[in-house]
Image (cartoon, rainbow, N blue to C red):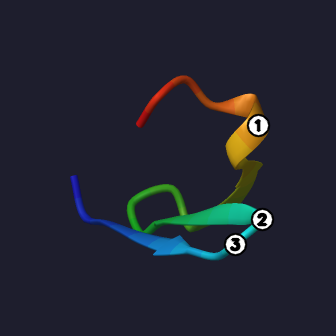
């Protein structure tokens, strides 16, 4: 899967080129990744 992970101090943006969507997740909402 072609995904780009952009890490910022407060959130992570996941760009999914297959679904043409942008997911913005807070690191607090993720398990230890």
Between residue 26 and residue 9, name the one nearer to us.
9
Q: Residue 13: percent from the left, percent from the top? A: 62, 67
Q: Which residue is mark 2?
A: 10
Q: CA distance from mark 3 to mark 2?
A: 4 Å
Do labels 3 and 2 touch, CB within 8 Å? Answer: yes
**Disc 1 from disc 2: Cα separation:** 8 Å
Of the two numbered discs 1 and 3 on the same chain, state the one appearing first in sequence. 3
Indicate the position of residue 32 as horizontal and vertical percent values.
Answer: 47, 28
Residue 16 horizontal side relative to residue 10, left or right: left
Residue 22's spot in the image, x, y percent? 66, 65
* Residue lying at 64% horizontally and 76% vertically, measured from the top left: 8
Q: Residues within 10 Å of mark 3 (few under 14, many from 20)?
A: few
**Secondary structure at numbered mark 1:** helix
- The residue positioned 25% from the left and 64% from the top of the image is 2
Would residue 21 be found to the left or right of residue 26 on screen?
left
Q: Earlier in the sequence, mark 1 or mark 2?
A: 2
Neighbours of disc 2 within 10 Å: few (<14), some (14-19), many (20+): few
Q: Which residue is tagged 3? A: 9
Farthest-out residue, left: 1
* Residue marked by disc 1: 28
Q: Are marks 1 and 3 in contact (CB under 8 Å)?
A: no
Relative height, residue 8 to residue 14 (above, below): below
Q: Is residue 22 left or right of residue 5?
A: right
Q: What's the distance in space between the residues labelled 1 and 3, CA to CA?
A: 11 Å
The answer to whether the residue labelled 1 contacts the one labelled 2, judged by CB atoms less than 8 Å apart, is no
How many numbered circles does the render carry?
3
Helix, strand or loop for disc 2: loop
Q: Nearer the viewer, residue 15 or 29?
A: 29
- What residue is at 56 percent from the left and 67 percent from the top? 20
């Amino acid at each position: 899967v072609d995904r780009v992970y952009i890490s910022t101090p407060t959130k992570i943006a996941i760009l999914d080129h297959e679904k043409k969507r942008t997911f913005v997740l807070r690191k607090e909402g993720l398990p230890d990744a």
